[in-house]
Image (spheres, grey):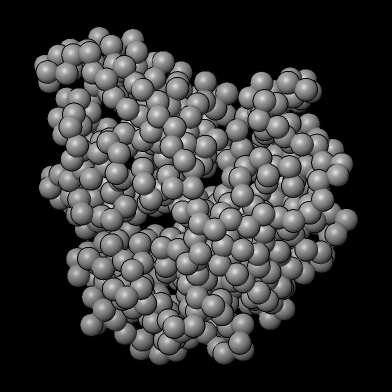
Amino acid sequence: MPDNHHPGRRSILAAGAAGAASLGASWLLTGCTGAASAPVLPVAARQGTPDRGGTLRIARPPASDAETLDPASALSAYEYLGALYNRLVRIGRDGTLAPDLAESWEPDDQARTWTFRLRKGVTFHDGRAFTAADAAYTLRHILDKKTASPQAAVLAPLIDTDRLRTPDEHTLVVPLKTPNAEFPSLLTHYNCYVVPDGSARSIGRTGIGTGPFKLESFAPAGPGRVTAYTDHWQGRPVLDAITFYTVADMSARSNALLAGQVDLLSQTNLDFATARVIAASDRATIARVENAQWYVLPMLTTEKPFTDVRVRQAMKLAYDPEHVVKVALQGAGTAGWDNPVPPSDPAHIPAHPEHDPEKARHLLKQAGHEGLAVDLYTSSYDPVFTPMALAYQDSARRAGIRVRVRTAAADSYYTQIWMKKPLMATYWYTGRPVDQLFTQVFRGGSSYNETAWSDKDFDALLDRARRETDDRRRRELYGEAQTFVIDKGGAITPMFADRLVGISRKVRGYAEHGFEFDYLGIGLKGA
């Protein structure tokens, strides 16, 4: 499943629209009424030091009524997590592993047992000291079948819970069932935030963590508020509070930003026309996060015609990723060439098959699918889905493939379409460590394997990469895994998109990395 929440009950931000620079549908589609003269989009968030205090107002998409503050859950309230909790290990600004609640970690000589040295002087929001017992409990909670955590599929085959131990209050020893030189990187996932020992039944309501903010209120699929935790181990956050609103759709969220009713649009990748309107306004602007989202057209390999690897290869060779980037993103992104590992990842390989419509025709003829016609499902859930689908349709036509673009309802897209239709549009956030990416999305049997592709040789290749303690050789093996996915897998990956985040011109310190922005340092000018 992608890194967004399934829509549920909708809660509209109640505020007067008087004076708002309204974004109507025709305006967004045409880019008229001033948008054509808008400046080039900013390449980064506004710089400068924020003032101490103030409340940041965040608008987020609709969520499930079963939404919870339990970070291990598949229905976790994603926007709250980085404010309320810390991980053991996080992704740093440079994309490498960085300490969080663990100050250091080291493996044995086979990378089969990992020892984490934990930070002292850290307290939870209820005043209790953080210890190794909490770290061990968090791992067991993720792996508990009752939790049904998406990260369990990644960690359960690895962690030997029977031998998990805490030699002292600030040491966690994690024995693995098989060697894994990448293991600490798997703990950077947003399901791995640390929760208090014994909190499984209450954490979904209380949100008690060690993060820079503590919970004041929370309503599933509705509004909520967090306030600064003055005893945070890294120091008090810049802001006094953050208020969260659930707003029905992209247009409503964008209008609220333009009207000055909210300060930041979370989990919303603005379409280019809307982004230009916002960037040209007096109240708001754009924070641009390079290659932050990875867009996919998954082919279900258990459904004809995609059971045939020749058809899958033809679908990839038939279209030009550069064309899709130009049309769907107005150039605000990078061609994917069907490789899900982003160009910024040290393990990324640039080699790929070239766009070749004639070879695609030949493969289809070999497979008995000359003149192939397929349905490609999309929706308004994400503004890039339909432009991407239409661009693919246009490009693949040169290979004789007829693509019928079908528009499905946004509020049921991830329950009725995703992983059910043979071909559809979706996206993921980048920032995953390479082993997490392959294990969660491409390994046979994973619950998030959206193409249902299963290849024992590919899985064995991942196992070899995990066991390899030589960094250079391990990177080579992950490069071979990329070639495997490109050549045989079911995922068409046209592009990596720059996420265009709508923010108030008052916002300072917006720095996004590893799925989230910096809750500790973000603030407002003139708060």
Residue 359: x percent and y percent? 22, 13
The C terminus appears in which quarter of the rendering? bottom right
Q: Residue at x 68, y 76 (%)?
A: 216
Q: Give the side of residue 256 with respect to residue 391, left or right.
A: right
Compared with 174, 459 (above or below) is above
Residue 299: tell me if it is visible.
yes
- Counting from the top left corner in percent of width and height, residue 335 is at 44, 27
Give the residue displayed 28% in from the left and 62% down from the top.
Answer: 153
Q: In the drawing, does residue 194 fall left or right of residue 488?
A: right
Q: In the rendering, at what x and y percent does residue 406 appear?
A: 40, 29
Task: Say left or right for 404 vs 234.
Answer: left
Q: Quadrant of residue 140?
A: bottom left
Judge left or right: residue 453 versus residue 182.
left
Report if residue 353 is visible in the image: no
Residue drawn 59% across the image and 84% down it: 123
- Which residue is depicted at the point 40% across and 22% down? 392
Camera-side residue: 315 or 419? 419
Relative to the observer, which residue lies in front, 374 or 444? 374
The total number of labels drawn is 0
